[in-house]
Amino acid sequence: MDFLITILEQGLIYGILGLGVYITYKILDFPDLTADGSFPLGAAVTSALIGRGVNPYLTLPAAFFAGALAGVCTGLIHVKGKVRDLLSGIIMMTALWTINLRIAGTSNVPLFSKETIFKNSFLEKTIPENIAPYITILVIIVLTVITKLILDFYMSSKSGFLLRAVGDNEKLVTSLAKDQGNIKILGLAIANGLIALSGCIFCQEERVFEISMGTGAIVIGLASVIIGTGFFRNLRFMKATTAVLIGSVFYKACTAVAMRNFEPMDMKLVTAVLFLIVLLISMERKKKVKNHA
């Protein structure tokens, strides 16, 4: 039971990251490697604020806005600096390594003795004892659902439709007298804000900040998006955001099961192999769809 709960916890946390990657990868068609830097950025901001006695719930919006700022910087480098999308992400990812160290103060910050969104005096007073063992998963579910609903609401707004149009038809955006560059920057800000928010929650769930915790974050996010949108695309009643969250949980379940048969040092290799398998299956499904069309 604990094993399944852990998979669900990790899957939903990385699912929020997946929602950010969904915006850049699927909507904007932007290979944004900033994710590997903005994920630990959210954790760095969180550890710094909690270490100074700030209410842990305030770290959530703080991490989001820090990630959004990183996304804006990536967008400005690409749009205003005319640097290629892939290189823009690499530049920002590299810069964030040092920025994260500056914010956190060190490469490793334990939070075991600090209050977090999962363990604090408010929850201890309000949550019944029989529910207390499941408080972590309940908080993660609530945060994930709220994030998904807000994103769904935004994507159905005028600004959200323009964001979709930038990835699908840039000429349409220009014909509406809108600056496609500014909309792309906005999309990158929202995406990296979500990724940093995921890092914030992960940091408090693990009760530690580690400078390398963002390594491979983009791979997990892409796997979630590919599994979700690739395997559940035929379910018309399911929104893309829901599919991404399910894809993330499924991917974490696969890695968790695989790691039971391997050493911890093999984690990155297992992750890479699983991602390759997911990618190949997704490509094969696309070929079949084209052949039937």
Image (tube, rainbow, N blue to C red):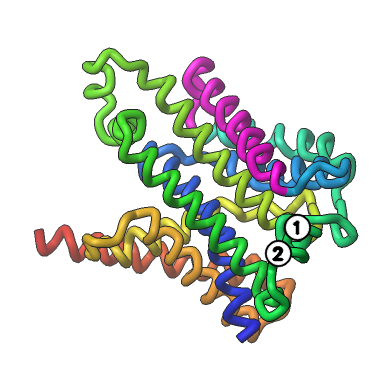
Q: Which residues are magenta?
A: 57-85
Please report contact status of discs 2 and 1: CB closer than 8 Å, yes or no: yes
- Does the image show residue 220? no
| Residue shown at the point (77%, 34%) measured from the top left | 99
What is the quadrant of residue 3 in the picture? Answer: bottom right
Q: Is residue 246 above or below residue 76?
A: below
What is the quadrant of residue 133 in the picture? Answer: bottom right
In this rendering, position of residue 212 left or right of residue 286: right
In this rendering, position of residue 261 left or right of residue 235: right
Depth check, front residue: 61 or 198: 61
Q: Main secondary structure of the magenta part?
A: helix
Q: Amino acid at mark 2?
A: Thr
Picture coordinates of residue 87 (x, y %)? 55, 32
In this rendering, position of residue 172 left or right of residue 291: right
Quadrant location, the C terminus:
bottom left
Picture coordinates of residue 52 (x, y %)? 88, 41
Picture coordinates of residue 157 (x, y %)? 32, 34
Picture coordinates of residue 281 (x, y %)? 35, 68
Q: Is residue 79 above or below residue 137?
A: above
Residue highlighted by disc 1: 122
What is the quadrant of residue 290 in the picture? Answer: bottom left
Residue highlighted by disc 2: 126
Residue 267 - label: none
Q: Amino acid at mark 1?
A: Phe
- Helix, strand or loop at mark 1: helix
Q: Is residue 96 above or below residue 18?
A: above
- Does the image show residue 144? yes
Q: For marks 2 and 1, give the CA distance.
A: 6 Å
| Residue shown at the point (68%, 57%) measured from the top left | 202
| Residue shown at the point (65%, 83%) measured from the top left | 2
Report crowding for label 2: few under 14, some 14 to 19, many 20 or more residues within 10 A (C-alpha). few
In this rendering, position of residue 36 left or right of residue 211: left
